[in-house]
Amino acid sequence: MQDASRTPSIKHLRHSNNPAQQNYFSSLIPFQPLLTKIRPPSLPLKHVSRPFLVSTLNHNITQYKLTLLTSSPGFGKTTLLSEWCADPPETALPYAWLSLDERDNDPKHFFAYLLFALQCVHLVEDFNHLLPPSPHEALSETNLSYLLNEITISIPYDFVLILDQYHCITSTAIHKAILFLLEYAPANVHFVIAGRTPPPFPLARLRAQARLIELGDKELRFQLSEASQFLKEKMQVSLSDEQVATLNQRTEGWITALQLAAYALRKQEGEGIDRLIHSFSGNHHYILDYLTAETFHQQSTTIQTILMQTSILDRLNPSLCAAVIDENDGYAILDTLEKTGLFLIPIDGEEGWYRYHRCFRDFLYHLLTRTSPDILPELHYRASIWFELQGEYPSAIEHALAASDFERAIALLGQVASHLLTQGHFLLLLNWLIAIPDEYILAHPLLCLVYIWSMIFRGYTSNVEKYLRSVKLSAAPQSASSPNRNEKIDEAYWQAASAAVHCYLANIQGRIHDAIESASYALKHLPVADFPMRVQVVMVAGVTVWLTGKEAEAIPYFEQAYRDNLAAGSLPFACTSAWVQAKLYIIRGYLHQGMELLQQALQIIEQLSPNATEESLLATGMLWLGIGNIYRYWNNKELSIHYLTKGLELCSRWDGIGLAGPAMIDGMLTLALFRLEQGQEKEAQEIIYQAEQYVHKYSLHFYTPLSLRIFQKRFKPEGGAQLTQFILSKVPTSFLYELDQMVDIRFFLQQKEYDRALNILAPLLEQAQAANRRAIVLELRLLQALAYEGKRDSMQAGQALCQALADGASDYFIQPFLAQEQAMYDLLVKVLDLRNKTPQPDWPAFPLDYALNILDAFKADKQSIPAQHESGKAFQEKTSIEQLTPKEQEVVKLAIQGYSNSEIARKMCLEVCTVRWHMKNIYGKLQVHNRIQLALKVQEAEL
C-alpha cells in the first residue's frame, strides 16, 4: 500500500498548468497538448454517489494487477472512475489518467500522452529518446524495459495508471506494448482499463493467476435505491416507489436510459406518466436518437445487418445466429458482435449464450421492422426450425407464431400441449392460442380441448361453449397429441372428452347431478392412456361426492388423483389433490393426518424442485395455505399467518387461479379473521375486498363464492335466508349448509334466543354426526353448550362442553373454543370447577391437561379474555410458600393428568393414605383447594 511518508504531494500535479510540463510535452510531439486528456472529467451535476462501487475499487485496485471496467455505453464507467479519483488526496492513491480516442492509435502520439500522464506521479525523467522515430512504430521492448526500470527506481509507492475509453484503441502495436507493461511492471504499479469491449489481452490467464478483477454491466447498472435517488432527487421527477421500480426494471438499470426517460417524463402529467413508464423501451424517440448516433451508425453495414437480424432473438448462441442469418460461421458472427461492445450480455448459468440489453434489442427490432419488414417471416421461420431441432418447442412455437405460420405452430403445439397442461402452464398456452385465428383452432378438435382446459384452469369459462361445440361436431383428424397417435380418433372419444368438460363445468357451477352423470360417462369411455383428462375427471368426481356430504367416500378419489399426478410428474395437480384431501381430513377432524399429508407433499415436491417448473413450485402455495389453516386450529398464530401469507403470495403469482381459487379464498378468509381478532379492521376489509375481486373476476368453483358469502353473513345477517335457501337447493347435506346455519345460531345466541338456536342445532348435529364431520360436530357442541348455559341448564351445558372436549382432544383443537370468546371461558371454568367438586357420571371424560391448555390459550389471547377477568377469577395466581419436594412434584404430575389417588398409589408404590397426605401438603404449600386449582397453579407458575 501507499507509504505516506515517502509519497510526494501530487495535488498540484493533478490540477496544475505547469509550463515545464507543457514544454516537456512539446518536445515529444509538435502540437499543443490537451490537458483534459490527463485529467478525470468533472463529476456531472446530476451525479449520484456510488460509495459501494468506490469502496470496491479502493479495496481491490491494489490487490490485483488489472482492474477492468467493461460495459456498453451509458453505464457510468468514466463517472465512477472520476468519483474514485475525487477522493481526498491524503487518502487516495496517486494516479495517472489518460482519456483515449481514435487519434491515439498513432503509437508515437499514444506514448507521448502516456509519458505526459505519468508526470502526475512524479516520473520526471526526460523520455524523449524512448519515443519511436516514426509515428506508426511502437516502443521497442528495450525502451519499455527502460521505462519500467525508471519507474521501479523513482516511484517507490503504489500508484494507478488509468486508461479510459480503451475500446478506441485498435493498434496491435499499442496493445502489445500495454500488455508488456502489464506483465512486467513492478508490484506497486496497478492498471485500470475502462472501455466498451475487453482489451485483446490473455484475460483467462490473468483470471487464473488472480491478477484480474472485472466490473461489467451487471455491477455498474443502477440498483433500485440509486435509480430512486437519481430520478427523484437529481432529475426532480415525482414518481412513486413502484413507478421507479418498474422503470428501473424496464431499463435494466442503464443510467443513460433512465436519464432520457426522466427528460421524457417531465413532459407528462397524470396517467401519461404511468403509461410512459410501462411502455418505455428502445422504441422511444429519445432512445432511438441516442443509440442511432452513439452506436448504430458507427458500425459497418455488415454489422448493422447482423445486429438487426439477430434482434428477433431473446437469446443468442453461435449456432442459432448462423441459422438465422444463414451463414456458416456462427462463432465469427458472435465474435463480431462481442467486439462491437454494444449491449451484448452473457446469460448467467448458460455458457455460450448471450442476450441484448432490452432497450437495445427494442431499438434494433424497431429498425428492422422499419427498414426490412419483408424479411421478418423468414427470419422467424429459420429460428423456429432451429429451436425445434434442439427440442425447445416453446421457443419454436413463439417464432412460428411471429412468422404467422399457424399450421406449423399448431403442429408444434400438438407435441407439447398435454405436457404443458399437466405442468400448469395455462397462461402460456392461452397466449399462444389467442394468437392463432379461430378458423385454425376450430379445425383442430384436440387444440380446442387444450384451449378449453387452459381457460378452465385459468378461471375463464365464458368462451368454452364455442370450442366445445367444435369438439362435438369434429370428424376427428389425426393428431400428434392424441392418445392413439397412429389411429383415427372415433366419435366415442370426442363424446367422452365433451363429457369430461361438461363434468367440470357442471361441478364448478353447482350442478351436482349433471356432474355425477358426466363424470361416470367420461371415466367409462376415456382411453386409459389419456391420463390428463382422466385424472381431472377423477378429481371432479371426488369434489362432487364431497359436496353431497360424503367426505369419507370422496377421500379415495383424491388419494388416487394425488398418487397418479405425482407418478406422472404433474405437480400442480398433485398440490390441488393434496389440498382438497387435507381439507376433507380437517372437516372430519383429523388435523394430524391432514398436516402429515401436506408436509409430506411439500417435502416430495421440494425434492423434485430442481427439475420442476416455476409453475409447479408456485402451485405449492396451496399446500402452504392448508398448513396455515391447520395451525390456526391449533392456535399457533405466528406459524398460521406465516404459512397463509406465503401461500397466498405463491398462488397469486401462478396461472392456475381456476385450480387454486378455493384454497386462496379459504386462506384469505382465515387471514381476515386473524386481522379482525387483532383489531385490524381496515386490513381485514382489504383482504375481503381482494377475495371479492377474485370471485368476480374468475370463474371459480361455486364452493368459493359460497364460502365468501357465509363469511360475510357473520357481519351482515340480513339476506341470510336467501343464502340458506340457495345452499339448500345445491348441497343440502354438505358442510357448507352446516357452516351457514352456524352463522344463524351465533346470531340467535347474541340475541338470547336460545330455543331458536337449539332447534336449529338438533338436526344439524344429527346430520354432521352421521357424516362423521368431527370438526363441524365440535363447533356445534360448543354452540349447544352456550345455548344451554344461556337457558341456565348447567347440566346440559356441561355435558355438551365435556363431549366437545372429548371430541377435540385427540387432534388438539384449540381455536374453536377461543372463537366463542368470554362466554366459553366462563363456562369452561365453571364446568371444570363443578366437575371437580361433584362427580358427574353423565358427563363424558376428557384429558384434563387439554382443558387446562385451552384455558391458558384464553388467557394468552387478549381478545378472548379481558385482563380484569383474568386477574379476578377463582384461579388467581398465588405465590408458593415453599418448594415442593421431588416426591410431591411426581404426585402433582400424575394428579393433573387425571389419575385418582388409588391410581397414583399404584403407580408410585405407595399407600392411598400416603398419597392423601402428600396431596394435603401440596394444597397447603400452593394455597389451592382442589385439583383444578392445583393444575392451574402448576401451569401458571411453571412449577
Image (cartoon, grey):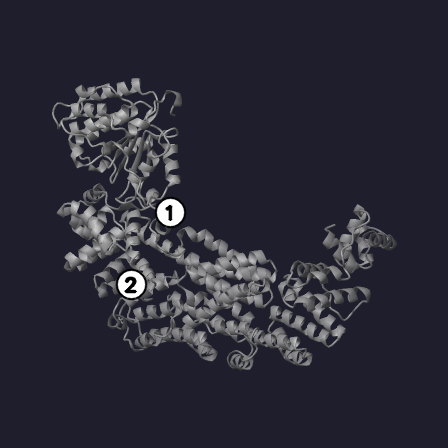
Report whether 493 appears left or right of 805: left
Residue 229 visible somewhere in the drawing: yes
Q: Is residue 364 above or below residue 499?
A: above
Residue 312 visible somewhere in the drawing: no
Q: Secondary structure at mark 2?
A: helix
Q: Secondary structure at mark 1?
A: helix
The residue nearer to you, when weighing 218 against 832, is: 218
Report whether 301 appears left or right of 281: left
Quarter location, residue 41: top left
The residue nearer to you, when weighing 671 against 258, is: 258
Name the residue: 24% across, 39% down.
Answer: 197
Name the residue: 54% across, 58% down.
Answer: 641
Residue 913: x and y in percent read: 88, 54
**Residue 413's disc number:** 2
Report whether 490 appears left or right of 131: right
Of tags 1 and 2, which is closer to the observer? Answer: 1
Distance (Cα) linking label 1 and label 2: 44 Å
Residue 465: x and y in percent read: 34, 76
Q: Which residue is mark 1?
A: 226
The residue nearer to you, when weighing 489 against 804, is: 804
Quarter location, residue 808: bottom right
First of labels 1, 2 by sequence position: 1
Quarter location, residue 334: top left
Three-letter amino acid code of the residue under disc 2: Leu
The residue nearer to you, when weighing 104 against 553, is: 104
Three-letter amino acid code of the residue under disc 1: Glu
